[in-house]
Image (cartoon, rainbow, N blue to C red):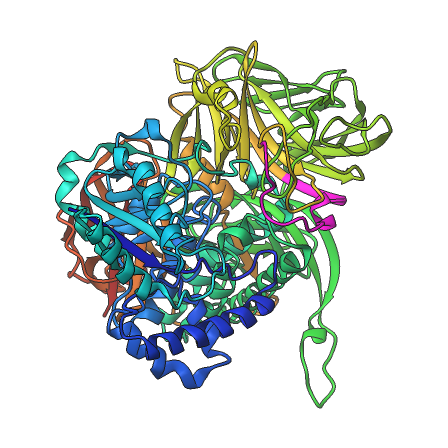
Amino acid sequence: MKKFYIVPHSHLDREWYRAFQENRIKLTHFMDDLLETLDNDKDYTNYLLDAQTSFIDDYFDVRPEEKEHFKKYVQNGQLPIGPWYVQPDEHLPTAEGIIRNLLISKSISDEYGDFLRIGYAPDSFGQSATFPTLMKGFGIDSTIFYRGFAESDSKYNDFIWEGLDGSQLIATWMPIGYGNAMFLNEDDANNINVIEENIELLTQRNISDHYLLMCGSDQSYVKKFLPRTVKRLNELYKEKELDYEFVLASPMEYINAIRPYTDKMETVVGELRKGKRSRTHNSIGATRLDIKKQNFEIENKYLHLLEPVSALGSIYGVHSDKAIIDRGWKYIVENHAHDSICCCCTDIIHKEMQMRMVYADQIAEYLLKEKFEKLHQMIRYGSDRGRPILLFSSYLGKRTSYIDADIYVKNKDFMIYDAAGNELEYQINKVEPFNLKDTKVSFTPIPDDFYDKTSISLYADQVGYGYQTIYVKEGLRPEYSKCIQTNDTSLENDVIRIEIVKDGTWNITDKTTGIEYKKQHIIIDDGNAGDEYDYSPSHNDKQYNSIGAMKACELVKETNLESSLKVTYEMMIPETTTNQCRSEALIKLELATTVTLRKKDAQVYVKTEIDNHAENHRIQVLFDIGTIVSTNFADIQLGEIIRDNEFAESQTSIDDKWHEYYYPVFNQHKYSGLRKEDGTGFIVLNKGLPQYETYQEDTTKLAITLLSSVGFMGNTDLKYRPGRRSGSTDATPQSQMLGKHTAEYSFMPISNDVDYIQLAEQYNNPIYAISYAEYTTEGSLPDTLTIASSNSGLIATTLKPSSQKDGYVLRVVNPYSYELTDVELSVNRFIFNKISTLNLAEEPEVNTNVFVKKLNNPDGSDLAVMSGIVKISKVNRNQLTTLLLETK
């Protein structure tokens, strides 16, 4: 018997070509109609609300009186909700951003019962290799999705999808999307045609005689007739004497029906990005890089500062403010909807997104100020050591870091020491007068109290997750010498040398290996006839580059800790680009690149300022490994992934007229890189630049996208994406990215003995320094406190108060592309007296690889000794481990 599972649904974009408030009007009318339909038709047994719970918030904000009405249908199973708050892009948010999306949704669905335990992803632009891991962490063991799969990936549309860490999901691919039965109506002939088309489409690739028919589309209305249509289909095919059954179903009914066939399912590993049967928009990561950079910054602020500092404070009695921090996360996650964070929306929606990030940042800045001040007041600083500088680190390992700080001194001569009395070398960047009186309010006169507010940079060692104090001793003058050899075109320290060649290219020498990387940092400019969804060159495109375009190179900074060159380029590029060609009229493109070497670093730090007045083009910066290599590697949400530099399907995607050209353009998080078989090569670290591309020419080149400029949400007949437009025809002038933009990145040579993954984490998660003009020596907390530490390679993704019970969630990841064994994590047993394991939903879960070796033996010492040991016998590559730390 063939059984057809007809799933009524609507794909409800919270915002896209219409703004949120406009779509909420449609949502309100839709939800009113849906509830009325369920009231009046007992045969309407299921409706899928796009697996999002944000619509519950949005609807009840204007219809609070309908909450119990709605709740009844959720609890009886007619309206499955979740697991998402918003349908996310799977690539651009951090892993914690995706986890918060699911946690926010769970907090809503918990009020009604359970959530839909399917990772339903009808419209995400390609599927991330981390998706199975994140789903399994929430007790979800299946997914139904649309984009990124191709017939060559598996014999059947139903298969086992395996994440990089080995997590597996039952996966169902919808080959023509979430509307293969959207045209069902009340006409018998039409409906038979819809069914027969689906039988022809699905039968050869179905793993069983079960058929998934998705009856809905974007913002579709409630098809009130559907129960009657299902009943009539059963009658029609009975008349045909065919053993067919049609049911109005939930997606879980289909998943449960195919579970017995898992032994037949093939296993597919990793990310799914092929645009054969659907558009995956693989180059969408470069649209509105200003917004994507803002998202990078605000997620980092919450994960590396706000939440851990709030957790630390709450251990010692400071209110955690969890509810308001969660509201800040909700602002962030609202922007993670796939159309939103990918920035394929109208200008007004992008402005609203930026305002949400402003709101999230306002919460973060106010709470950080408040919590650091309270922590500062609680610390017992050394009475004779000098003015304190508090250094906070949310990194588990030991590091020597370059730190920026503002300090307040009354004497221009001072030296800085760590808690052990070791002198710390620093440099002064800026000095400005500061009157403490101006920060106080009083009804009586306050005397002037002047300081020099002095911006400094220094190197300091720090171990583990927590804080330490260093001290400024006034009245002492240090003696420092220059550490970097410089001239007007070169910089050199003990480990690396960079020379700016006359043609504007860079030669970078790794002094530890003797390898010279020539002709680096070439700026290239291509036409962009694409749209907000896809980069696409014109059909007769012409590329421009920075070779010979250097206008000046000058030494602009030389101190005892770092030196900088400023390289300026002037390129004449076309004013605009059409689908056919770039314009003959040219316009000046000015770029100012500051390149910096530091005393103790093997990195070349780069900041490029772009003054853009051209439209419809793309700017990338090239780094060349000097030979052909077959793979690249990059950081994604849960660590490193290795990818091919060439796809066998690239030419096939053209010849066979795929929905879009399949070529090696990728998403990244902290870094991407190239290396040779002997392990030597380089990485390019970045701060909020989510896209890179590889070119296989005479040598392999890594290209980081610095700016992409387009003027419409959707265009037609693109070279890289033939046929219809994606999205609407709305003009999006803000997506032209006119004006000044800044990109930060770093070039670092690597070899087998360089742990670049940890260095990339440190680059994106620097030590945070804060000091005050006034301080006390009467506090109760020690001036150095470590919560947790590990030198085993684990990276902490979060430390925060638990959502489910008292205690603190510490989540760590193995960021490497290989398994770690016998990993040790030290926790502060002076603070914590119980450790257990959780899943990502923060529910208790037994992890047989985790052992608490030593914990409940407090020594009572003032410094809170790090003697609690957690041993993890095995951590798979890219695997998360979540711990609940409970306090005394």
Residue 723 location, x and y as percent? 59, 34
Asked if residue 729 is among those painted magenta in the image, a careful observer would answer yes
Judge by depth and name the residue closer to the eye, 72 or 618: 72
Which portion, as a residue range, is magenta?
A: 722-743
Farthest right residue?
A: 585
Farthest front residue?
A: 239
Q: Is residue 771 above or below residue 491?
A: below
Q: Is residue 861 above or below residue 201?
A: below
Judge by depth and name the residue closer to the eye, 801 or 845: 845
Q: Is residue 189 above or below residue 822?
A: below
For the C terminus, give its image quadrant.
bottom left
Q: Is residue 165 visible?
A: no
Residue 651 location, x and y as percent? 50, 18
Residue 365 appears in which quarter of the rendering? bottom right
Is 158 placed left or right of 490 in the picture?
Answer: left
Residue at horizontal 55 percent and vertical 12 percent from the top:
699
Is 481 placed left or right of 635 in the picture?
Answer: right
Asked if residue 160 is among those painted magenta in the image, a careful observer would answer no
Residue 532 location, x and y as percent? 62, 43
Q: Is residue 339 visible?
A: yes
Judge by depth and name the residue closer to the eye, 832 or 16: 16
Residue 777 location, x and y as percent? 47, 70
Is 337 placed left or right of 154 in the picture?
Answer: right
Total marks in image: 0
Judge by depth and name the residue closer to the eye, 191 or 854: 191
